[in-house]
Image (cartoon, rainbow, N blue to C red):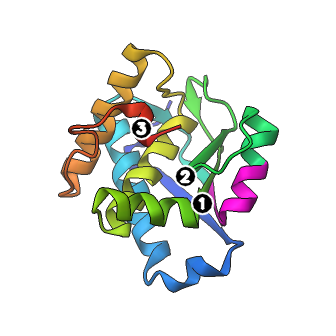
Amino acid sequence: MPDTSDGELSKDFLIEAKAWNDLDGLEMLIAFSLDAAYNHVVREEGIRFLPTCEISLVFVDDEAIRVLNAEHRGKDKATNVLSFPQDEDAEVFGPMLGDVVFAYETILREADEMGLAISAHLTHLCIHGFLHLLGYDHIESDEADKMESVEIAILAQLGLENPYEGTVVSDMLD
């Protein structure tokens, strides 16, 4: 298997809710966050990818994500981010990793409630969604601890603080 540290993560953006267009530099922020997460999991977690991988990023409103959440998780409410992995149990990921869907109003509200810049919260959720595509989860406490530690390490590399400090995981991520 080739060394994937020189691989490429292709990002496919679909903005379905016009409100996302109000965020300057959205695609650059997401690309930067994903590249940091990708490089970290290759280097520090030993996760392997095919030389070229693709991730789809979909930016919707609360109503659209509520429908997806109801259809796929049985929860008839809006949530901040949903991930739809292509194969979360792969030994080598790719060529398609999956889809990550972001809800504008929920993310904006949460950032405001936590006193965070929208860019910081969105960066965290981008990394969180990406890790779900790789099989990370937060249902069991040991899985949650592992996922959190990887998120915190990536965010620290980006100069962002621990978003979990003083919170309960289930308060932030549903």
Q: Start and end of the magenta stretch?
A: 56-67
Residue that appears at 34% across and 53% down? 36
Q: Residue 129's spot in the image, x, y percent?
A: 52, 45
Which kind of residue does numbered mark 1 sit on? Answer: Ala
- Tell me the CA gap for discs 1 and 2: 5 Å
Any part of residue 21 in sight: yes
Q: Residue 25's spot in the image, x, y percent?
A: 43, 80
**Marks 3, 1: nearer the viewer:** 3
Secondary structure, mark 3, is helix
Residue that appears at 47% across and 38% down? 131
Q: Give residue 168's quadrant in the image.
A: top left
| 109 or 150, nearer to the observer | 109
Q: Is residue 121 left or right of residue 155?
A: right
141 is higher (above) or lower (below) than 2? above
Q: Earlier in the sequence, mark 1 or mark 2?
A: 2
Which kind of residue does numbered mark 3 sit on? Answer: Asp
Q: Is residue 135 left or right of residue 172?
A: right
Any part of residue 3 in sight: no
Labelled disc at residue 171: 3
Q: Is residue 84 left or right of residue 114?
A: right
- Tell me the CA gap for discs 3 and 1: 17 Å
Look at mark 1 in the image and give the residue it sits on. Answer: 103
**Marks 2, 3: nearer the viewer:** 3
19 is higher (above) or lower (below) than 52? below
Q: Give residue 117's quadrant in the image.
A: bottom left
> Which residue, as the protein is rendered here, is positioned at the far front?
113
Look at mark 2 in the image and give the residue it sits on. Answer: 80
- Tell me the CA gap for discs 2 and 3: 12 Å
